[in-house]
Amino acid sequence: MPVETDVLVVGGGATGAGTARDLALRGCDVTLVDREGLAHGTTSRSHGLLHSGARYAEADAAGATECLEENRTLREIADACVDETGGLFVQLAEDDPAYFDAKRRACEEIGIPVEVVDGDDAREAVPGLSDDVERAMRVPDAVVSPSRLVAANVRGATERGADAFSHAPVEGMRVEDGEVVGVAVGGEVDDTVSPEVVVNATGAWAGELAAMAGATVEMRPTRGLMVSVDHADLETVVNRSREPGDGDIVVPHEHEAVLGTTSKPVDDPDEFERADWERERVREECATMYPAVSDAAAVREWWGVRPLYEPDEADRGGRGISRGFFLLDHADEGVDNFLSVVGGKLTTYRLMAEATADAVCERLGVDEPCRTAETELPGASDPALLDEFVSSLGGPGPSDSDVVGR
């Protein structure tokens, strides 16, 4: 007998979990499914940066503003998920000073707090910073635990009556009279789900799911490598102030430092090359900012796949610096109750979820406001409880396995 639900959310990363929680808080009946473990995909494979917006300020003011606002919101609602490290953008001797100045001006125009310091003051604040750092800009970057964040959102959804299933892949959809009327879900569900609305929050895999409904989502996934090294002395995020490139960020993770990243297009987000040159490039480039990582022992590494939206990437001409998100309504393709949310950043997951939930509620005739910006996540002030939530969902992903459960 089909499982009936108001909303089927497919994809258990931050955006899908956040959407499920938002909808549950508004009184909707929600079912969340993921083909593997919740947060198994892109969310669990980032470097864990909670953006201040500074990275995007000069190229995408709107996206940077979203990051700044959501950075502030998450510090309030997700306390123990966030490590308030602060961040530095450093200009090396070989870097274009005009780029640094443009970023500073853009940050100031947006309202991102910045403080410019000379190289000596930067090295005093971050011991071990390269002698080649000529000046630096302090920004309110932070580090977030993706596993805790997703687990807290899932718990927030299930406490309000939602159902959440991992290892529950979507195997097919039946569309009749312009609507998805049945979704075959395998694994732990092993049944047909009959939803009023379907939300496609599968990230880099959004095109594959959309095709099952006879819809189209053009994605341009890119792979990126993170290398975590044994180094406990770094306490501040260090970013390179230059055009986006390989190895331009070092993120502190308590006893480790995460070096990132690369960006190479992939045809298949499940099967792609993992190249030795990326390991070498990331370490070499990060060491130009922070030399101690050049010979620090590698503890672990992981590749993530970014869920970039092809039309936006094409407009920006390749390796862009925008991470805006897009909510796609597939009614114009003849599927009235199917929505896809793509792009974005981990930092803006809550905002993406709010926009998606607004659209879903409009279709369902639900007149309830979003409450996620002022409602604290379950366990937000209790790291041990958050880690219990993570354990109940199968354990942390690679991004924060060094932190969760310690």
Image (cartoon, grey):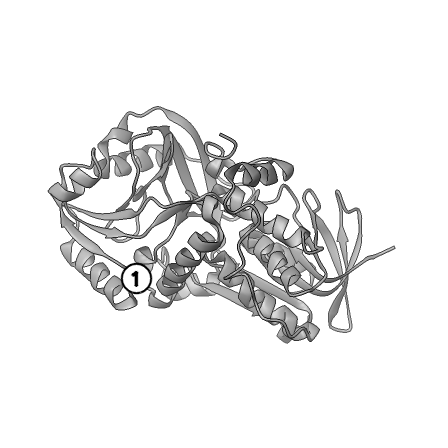
When the figure is inspected, residue 178 is found, relative to residue 224, above or below; the finding is: below
Q: Residue furthest front?
A: 381
Pick out the residue farthest to the right.
1
Q: Position of residue 225 (x, y in %)?
A: 41, 39
Looking at the picture, which amino acid does disc 1 mark? Ala
- Image coordinates of residue 195 in percent, x first then y, are 75, 63
> x%, y% of residue 80?
47, 44
Q: Position of residue 221 (x, y in %)?
A: 48, 52
In this rendering, would 399 be left or right of 86? right
22 or 106: nearer the viewer: 22
Which residue occupies the foreground of this view, 403 or 228? 403
Residue tagged by mark 1?
57
Secondary structure found at label 1 = loop
Residue at 64% in and 75% down: 367
Q: Is residue 242 left or right of residue 4?
A: left
Vertical position of residue 320 compared to residue 85: above or below: below
Q: Quadrant of the N terminus?
A: bottom right
Residue at coordinates 51% horizontally, 59% vertically from top-left? 350
Q: Residue at x 41, y 42 (%)?
A: 47
Taking the image as shown, residue 196 lies to the left or right of residue 9, namely right
Q: Quadrant of residue 288?
A: top left
